[in-house]
Image (cartoon, grey):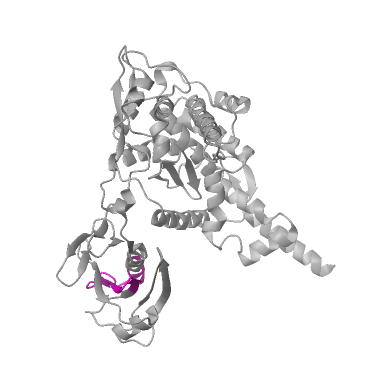
Amino acid sequence: MHYFNKILAGVLIAATAGCAFNPATNRPDLVLMSEDKEIEIGKEMHQKLVDSTPIYNDPVLTAYVDFVGQKVAAASDRPNLKYHFTIIDSQDINAFALPGGYVYINRGLLTYLHSEAEMAAVLAHEIGHITARHAVRQKTAATGAGVASVLSVLVTGSGVVGDVTNLWSTAAVKGYGREMELEADRFGAQYMYNAGYDPQAMINVISLLKDQETFSRRRARVEGKKQQTYHGVFSSHPRNDIRLQEVVEAAGKLPENQKVTKVEYYREKTDGLVYGENAQEAEKNRYNHKRLGFSLLFPDGWKVENQRSAIVGTAPDNSATITIKVDQRENNQPADMTLREVYKVHALEQDEALNQYRLTGYTGKLPEKSDSEPDRVAVIYYGSREYFLEGKINGDSGKDKKAREDYDNLFLTSIRSFRPLRKTDVVQPDIKHVRYVRANEKTTFAALARHMNIGNYAEEQLRLLNGYYPRGEPKPGEWIKIIQ
């Protein structure tokens, strides 16, 4: 009994230490993570995300999203946190946040918004998740509030130090549940008001997202398919959500001459935004060899040269190179043995087998090397040929451990991107863009749709883009979105 009391006392002390005052909720939270740890988790998860997810490469639009996001964040309950805003190059209609100040909005969602205030509403909602520490609080709840569970988490660190991908990504991307989503709405609406944006823009965003859901449901019924359930921003709300309307009203009403909406400015910044699946931003530095029939992604900005005996990609500052050499495959020996024979080593460091795009191979780092030798090597078997890939850091560029790790990650990314050439690699993609034009007396969405190659539901998509789903026509002189 005395032993149990000592354990219980320890748990209570530890739990008290884990209680942090939350400036957004205005109450203490049983949070088993410091703010520094929260930021560290977010930074690590962000790096994993940008390493594996295409980021939309438009400096002007990115700066615009960041400007609006920072304006809202400065009016939040955690203004001293450093916030990062990123546009994901995806047509999916979504936005999400990660712990520690990382906010993401998909290119696809930006195409359907109509004003800066609506974009601010999306960003404010995600900032609300961050200020309320929803990711941290949800993970704390998931570990269990029992004595044994709390003790285990506090003492061992499990649930905090583990695989951040498993811990955070599901909640961040798919939503936090009805109450936390409504809480994020309440904070977001208040932050919008504080920043001078009309909180009613939140209701507008709900309406356009619900139109998307209605169209998706009808399309699935017509095609006999299962509807894809939307889990993103504002997904937990019905169209006429009384509770949402209440929290928006509670944020306050700005005088008409002080409301920031900026329809025209948003139109200017999003004119030319890529529409659909054809952005290909992550593949823009892909090298395609038609004669040998292979394709490889080099790091962004690298110069690629087809030399006499090799293909060499060079970093903009000449700090590193990636070289591809090809030879006839003469036997069926394992790929790791081939590497050891060619580079005359008994073993490789940080080595692994490669199985990608139905090709096999092996990669590793040379344990001891001269300045003229590569740092990471790989061999990939493709048909009757074997391809050798070499990543080399030049001069003093990799003198510290962090720099060497960063270069090695670049080398591995390219090595893992090696694949057979596809037909789509040699055909210039038909990239479509959002453009704004003025309607006239004869403009109808049905007539516009006949001139746009955007699939079987062109009229419906144009209506969704312009806020006229399922019916209605634009007024003469009105600015509308078309796809070119």
Could you tell me if residue 175 is visible in this image? yes
Q: Quadrant of residue 166?
A: bottom right
- The residue that appears at 34% across and 29% down in the rendered structure is 266
Residue 230 lies in what quarter of the image?
Answer: top right
**167 is higher (above) or lower (below) than 252:** below
Q: Nearer the viewer, residue 81 or 274?
A: 274
On-image quarter of the N terminus: bottom right
Q: Is residue 412 magenta?
A: no
Asked whether residue 113 appears in the rendered view, the answer is no
- Measured as percent of width and height from the top left, residue 305 is found at 17, 63
Magenta region: 379-406
Q: Residue furthest right?
A: 1
Residue 344 percent coordinates (x, y): 30, 87
> Which quadrant of the rendered structure holds the C terminus?
top left
Image check: 209 left or right of 274?
A: right
Residue 200 position (above or below residue 342): above
Residue 107 in the image, given as x and y percentages of width and height: 39, 40
Q: Residue at x 52, y 44 (%)?
A: 130
In the depicted view, which residue is nearer to us: 176 or 322?
322
Q: Is residue 315 above or below residue 112?
A: below
